[in-house]
Amino acid sequence: MKRIFSKTYRFGRLSVSILMNEWIFLYRGNSRVIIKEIRTRDLFTTKMKIAYGAAAVLLALSVFLFRGPAGEVADAPTPQQTAQNDEDRKNRILQSRDTDFSTPKKKVKLVIRQHRVKKNESPARIAKKYGISLDTLCGSNNLNSYDYVKEGTVLKIPNKDGVLYRVKKGEKMVSVAQKYKASLPRIIAENNIKNPDFFAPDSIIFIPDAKPLDIVPGFLWPSMDRGITSGYGWRVHPIDRVRHFHLGLDMRSNYQWIKSTKYGQVTYTGWMGGYGKTVIISHPGGWKSLYAHLSRIIVRTGQYVKQGQFVAKSGNTGNSTGAHLHFELIKNGHHVNPYAYLVKKKR
């Protein structure tokens, strides 16, 4: 007598029953039940063998991922559970020492490399590759655009942030330092200058920190547009329609450049569940800032950024109803209302 094989797996509202001669897929919707039967002999046609094997592997992975502690298949997480899991993971990352600020390493010797621009390579991508700011890349090579550079162009790439500057005839170092708001003693030390009163025309010097680390006291507005679409506090989530506490500000920003709110160190870049592409920057004094739903990230983990430096572009990644910036401020592990700390005057 032939043994009859039967096994049923359940994934939330979907059930898959594997019988000897057929597979039965059953989906329980709110208004109706959908049943689909597939005969086993149909699965083993020549064209279906590869597809069947792939489906079997995916099914096995699904069973493993959804299996509960007692060995039974558990229901798929609800949207509310997924959102809570994302929130918990985000807070674990924010509380971790891995995302705390650390002071820069001791003085690094200046090294200038060359880079030939490849096809479809943008300044932002090149700057991220070498761990420098867009200001450094564009300022050192007289680039007029943050988004485009001609293929084949040879760029000078310093190994730290600052500007490579070509000295003009009769120019004094004091005026150059004032122009870039840079420290004259640091310029002299960085370039091993013997006589600061004389510079050969067309010589190249490196101006470290050509912009101050912090342009203004307090926190700079990270988005170009200052419109707020959702504030800090209780609200009904636009996707799952559940009331919860919104720990940041949603700012109107349609795929635009996003700036670092203050000088600090990039301590996290990557995908963060429902928050999509995310950047965390840690600042001196126990502060951290978070930028989420980004479309593009142009900084690397470990990189130091100045206040106002471009770090990403806003977007619509993760659980989002449209392009915008989700921005959070954290002080000593506790969320605060960012609006209370942002500089209100236009800069």
Image: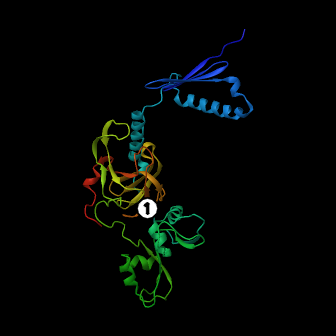
Name the residue nearer the viewer: 52 or 293.
52
Numbered marks: total? 1
On-image quarter of the N terminus: top right
Where residue 10 appears, as percent x and y from the top left, is 53, 24
Colour scheme of the rendered structure: rainbow
On-image quarter of the C terminus: bottom left
Query: Most extreme residue toward the right, as rendered?
Result: 46
In this image, 134 relative to 219: left or right? right
Where residue 297 appears, as percent x and y from the top left, is 47, 56
Count neighbours of disc 1 (C-alpha within 10 A) and say few if under 14, some if 14 to 19, many if 20 or more.
Answer: many
Query: Most extreme residue toward the top, as rendered?
Result: 1
In this picture, is 29 found above or below 6?
A: below
Q: Going 28% across and 64% down the picture, which residue do you hit?
A: 217
User: To which quarter of the image does residue 227 belong?
Assistant: bottom left
Which residue is identified by label 1?
A: 304
Name the residue nearer the viewer: 205 or 343.
343
| SS type, badge 1 | strand
Q: Going 57% across and 20% down the picture, which residue do you hit?
A: 8
Q: Going 41% across and 33% down the picture, which residue do you hit?
A: 81
Let me know if residue 68 appears in the view.
no
Name the residue nearer the viewer: 148 or 157.
148
In this picture, is 78 found above or below 268?
A: above
User: To which quarter of the image does residue 312 belong?
Assistant: bottom left
Name the residue nearer the viewer: 160 or 117.
117
Where residue 62 appears, as percent x and y from the top left, is 56, 31
In this picture, is 65 found above or below 316?
A: above
Where residue 255 appears, as percent x and y from the top left, is 42, 57
Amino acid type of disc 1? Tyr
Query: Most extreme residue toward the front, as rendered?
Result: 32
Let me know if residue 239 appears in the view.
yes
